[in-house]
Amino acid sequence: EPEVTQTPSHQVTQMGQEVILRCVPISNHLYFYWYRQILGQKVEFLVSFYNNEISEKSEIFDDQFSVERPDGSNFTLKIRSTKLEDSAMYFCASKGWETQYFGPGTRLLVL
Amino acid sequence: GENVEQHPSTLSVQEGDSAVIKCTYSDSASNYFPWYKQELGKGPQLIIDIRSNVGEKKDQRIAVTLNKTAKHFSLHITETQPEDSAVYFCAASIGSGGGADGLTFGKGTHLIIQP
């Protein structure tokens, strides 16, 4: 069964450093998403992406964040200058028509 | 924007009993309501969803009901088993079919099945 994959599974970085989180969505899906989940809290929507551009973004997704689909298979989330409060689990999701399928997540720890 | 409230935060039931988790939403434009199960260290997995033109949907031991007038929807799990132990999230979105709308999640319910 096709699934969303994410790399790395864990990332530790120093405050102020740039990180890139990578996702490979399900191959025939057209809509892509990033969510985050701070430890013990609910999953929060960051951004959606369709037809090579951002469709919708939340107030969390400020100028420090960017997304890109550099080729036909990868979907990336870049955090330009990480803050302590960026520590969270980041989930990628993709959708063909209605159901969003989530990847296993990348746990980001900012020190 | 949309706000989704979920109750209870923790639910402990005896194996074999039923479990009910309830959610309310604020935006009457929301028309798609999925439920996700999240096991420790994994991403959310869809278990069932319902659209606004349907009042109830069932899939084996799992059912979801939707009351659009009251803006609430519920997850029902019957004959609970140990493997049902997980965190369950309800969610809502405006897009039902097509569209890139993000999901608004509830805070989650930690379901514990007691043997």
Image (spheres, grey):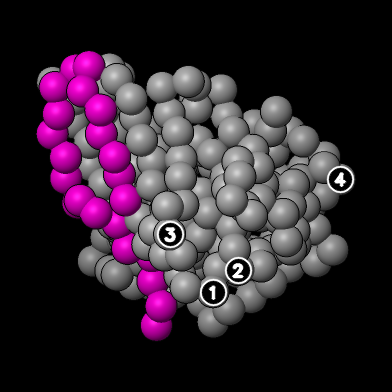
Q: Nearer the viewer, mark 4 or mark 3?
A: 3
* Identity of the residue drawn at 54% across and 82% down: B60
Q: Nearer the viewer, residue A26 or B5?
A: A26
Work out how far the residue at label 1 is from the one at label 3, CA to CA, in angstroms: 14 Å
Disc 3, SS: loop
Amino acid type, callout 1: Asn
Disc 2: which residue: A96
Q: Is residue B8 magenta?
A: no
In percent of the image, x 51 and y 60: which residue is there? A94
Q: Is residue A9 visible?
A: yes
Q: Nearer the viewer, residue B81 or B42?
A: B42
Q: On the image, which quarter does residue A84 sit in?
A: top left
Q: Are marks 1 and 2 in contact (CB under 8 Å)?
A: yes
Q: Judge the density around disc 3: few (<14), some (14-19), many (≥20) Cα neighbours within 10 Å.
A: few
**Earlier-in-chain disc, 1 versus 2:** 1
Disc 1: which residue: A28
Q: Is residue A72 above or below residue A79?
A: below
Q: Which residue position is annotated with label 4?
A: B69
| Residue projecting furthest to the front | A71
Which numbered disc flags the more N-terminal residue, 2 or 3?
3
Q: CA distance from mark 2 to mark 4?
A: 29 Å
- Residue nearest the viewer, comparing A21 with B5: A21
Q: Chain of mark 4?
A: B
For the N terminus of chain A, give its image quadrant: bottom left
Image location of residue B110, percent across then percent down: 36, 47
Q: Secondary structure at mark 1?
A: loop
Q: Chain of mark 3?
A: A
Local secondary structure at mark 2: loop
Q: What's the mark number on residue A95?
A: none
Q: Are marks 1 and 2 on the same chain?
A: yes
* Label 4 – label 3 distance at C-alpha: 45 Å
Q: CA distance from mark 1 to mark 4?
A: 36 Å
